[in-house]
Amino acid sequence: MKLIMMGPSGAGKGTHSEILSRKFSIPIVSTGNILREAVKNDTPIGLEARSYMEAGQLVPDDIIIGIVAERLAAPDCANGYILDGVPRTIAQAEAIEAAGIFFDAVLAFDVPDEIILERITGRRTCTKCGRSFHVTANPPKLEGICDGCGGELILRSDDSIDTVKKRLEVFYARTSPLGKFYDDRGVLKKISNQPTIEATSKIVMEALGI
Ligand code: ADP
């Protein structure tokens, strides 16, 4: 199964990627997590990406396309994967398609901006594995500690109100047009916002015909 998770920051892409990854035993490919790791390790890609990320801007397409091509060629991607946060531009989507990659479904999470702002300020992200939690909606078992790997949970430096507003603006301008791109290919599934993670998960499974 090959899936794309699409939607603004804090729409639930990461949370539902985790659920689907466990259910289908397929990896999550999150460009945000790959880039944060590169920034943490001061790699050449990290050094180039940092300023874009901190400003809530998109990292240039050529960097992203390179990262994705390399990651999808890894052996654990042979049976499928979940792309979280990529593609984010038409150029990225075209490059992936030009590489002969097609998707079973593109889940487009639709969440109002005011809910997003509330969610992001309560989001806590693992510095080690990238998994995200929410202080009230999805708290970790032990405060400040990742349930999955025991890593430290922090508020991401780009999860401030101002940067999130910028990221939302960029999403509507650059990423929303991908809805039509994938609808034209017959794979777009709209996921409307639900009050709980469980209710959203039910809609996701229905959309996937499970
Ligand atoms: P979000 O929490 O907004 O879903 P991510 O963790 O997916 O954010 O990404 C964080 C930042 O990394 C983005 O604001 C952007 O700067 C950069 N980034 C991640 N994926 C991409 C991509 N596909 N194209 C361009 N930039 C990206």
Image (tube, grey):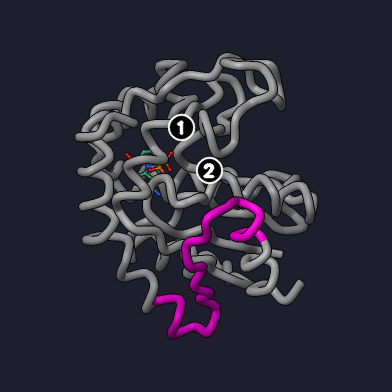
Nearest the eye: 52 or 119: 119
Residue 192, magenta (yes or no): yes
* Quadrant of the displayed image that contains ligand 1: top left
Q: Which residue in the protein does label 2 denote? A: 30
Kindly indicate the quadrant of the structure image that contains residue 165. top left
Q: Write down the quadrant of residue 35 in the picture.
A: top left
Residue highlighted by disc 1: 123
Q: Position of residue 80 (x, y in %)?
A: 71, 58
Q: At 57% across and 15% down in the image, what residue appears?
A: 144
- Label 1 to label 2, Cα distance in Å? 17 Å
Residue at 32 percent of width and 61 percent of height: 175
Please provide the residue range marked out in magenta. Answer: 181-201
Based on the picture, tell me whether residue 112 belongs to the magenta stretch: no
Q: Secondary structure at mark 1?
A: strand
Up-down: is 56 above or below 61?
A: above
Secondary-structure class at tag 2: strand
